[in-house]
Amino acid sequence: MRIPALKSFAVPAALAAVLAAAACGTTEDGQDAGGDAAAEGPVSVTDFLGRTVELDAPAEDVVALEWAEVELVASLGVMPVGVADLAGYNTWVGGVVPLDDTVTDVGTRSEPSIDAIAGLGADLVVMETDDEELIASIEEFVPVLVTEGSNETDNVARMKRDLDMIATLMGRTDEADALWSEFEAKVADTKAAIEAAGTGDVPYLFADGWIEGDAVAIRPFGAGSLVGSLGTAVGLENAWTGETDGMWGLGGTDVEGMAQYTDTELKFINNNADGSNIFTEGVAGNAIWENLAFVQSGDVYELPAGTWTFGGPRSSEALLDYFAEVYAS
């Protein structure tokens, strides 16, 4: 996946051409298998591309080339040996699922180093479909699992499928079951808290953004995004009803486009993990922005840094915690 560091995103007229960040449980060095990984024997799955991926034994040393998969591996109790764009992970994801200093950076997410990956002697490389052209080169050294990464139709079910594939090849299915049970409990608790507060009738708008030339580009998260799927799961209404990209559930607009919400009561939640302050400094003095009802009422909220909006169950739990903070505290 090639989402942040916030790639340029066109406004709605060009949207079809564009696809383009609860603490983690204790993680372990890959050599300390523990759990199901102590079992002997082969493991096998059919990955998102329909490929059979079979290992002689559960993987202990894993390289992950996208941040959601890094999070999933670490959340299952194994510290990955290699990660693409480690610094970016630490900024956008690491506040919830941190990595330790044993992890090796293997290059960027768009151009990971095959030599660096090969040098780690890993048992498995996990990637998403964005990296598909790398499969043949990497498989000369190590088996490759391809996950889906996002599905605008049902991102929660997709997240479960990706988790289960990785857990099976790591021999960590018990850990995956426990992780998912905790996530489902968090959904139920968050929904109950919002219902008890009686605030769930106010829609939310979740977005991130960046400066594009002299303008502020705004990327709303639609109902089909992972954030949107979580909002729906706890009974909230997503205020963004415009176009989305068909995969990640992301829209595109600018400050002028936000004028549609001038008189709309809503809660605006934004991601500022990189400290760019788009929705404070970037919009400062803009008459349209300052006239928005939710700005005037102070209903502008900043997601805690390091909470990944395209992640796994742990990141999703952190997002749910923040929905509860905004709506029920």
Image (cartoon, rainbow, N blue to C red):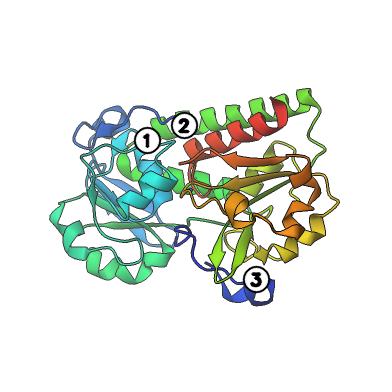
Please give the residue where the numbered disc 3 appears in the rendered image.
11
> Which quadrant of the figure contains the C terminus?
top right
Looking at the picture, how far across and down is residue 148, in whole percent?
47, 57
Distance from disc 3 to disc 1, alpha carbons, whole Å, reads 38 Å
Hey, what amino acid is under mark 3? Val
The reply to whether dot 1 and dot 2 touch (C-beta < 8 Å) is yes
Please give the residue where the numbered disc 1 appears in the rendered image.
76
| Observer-nearest of 282 and 230 | 282
Hey, what amino acid is under mark 2? Leu
Residue 226 versus residue 52 in the image, above or below? above
Please give the residue where the numbered disc 2 appears in the rendered image.
179
Q: Residue at x 54, y 50 (%)?
A: 277
> Which quadrant of the figure contains the N terminus?
bottom left
Q: In the orientation shown, which residue stands out farthest toward the front?
A: 285
Point out the tag, 3 or 1, that comes first from the N-terminus: 3
The total of numbered circles placed on residues is 3
Hey, what amino acid is under mark 1? Leu
Q: Residue at x 31, y 31 (%)?
A: 27
Disc 3 is placed on an element classified as loop
Disc 1 is placed on an element classified as loop
Point out the tag, 1 or 2, that comes first from the N-terminus: 1
Q: Is residue 91 visible?
A: yes
Looking at the picture, how far across and down is residue 276, in whole percent?
50, 53
Point out the tag, 2 or 3, that comes first from the N-terminus: 3
Q: Residue at x 37, y 52 (%)?
A: 88
Disc 2 is placed on an element classified as helix
Label 2: how many Cα within 10 Å (few below 14, some 14–19, many 20+) = some
Distance from disc 2 to disc 3, alpha carbons, whole Å, reads 37 Å
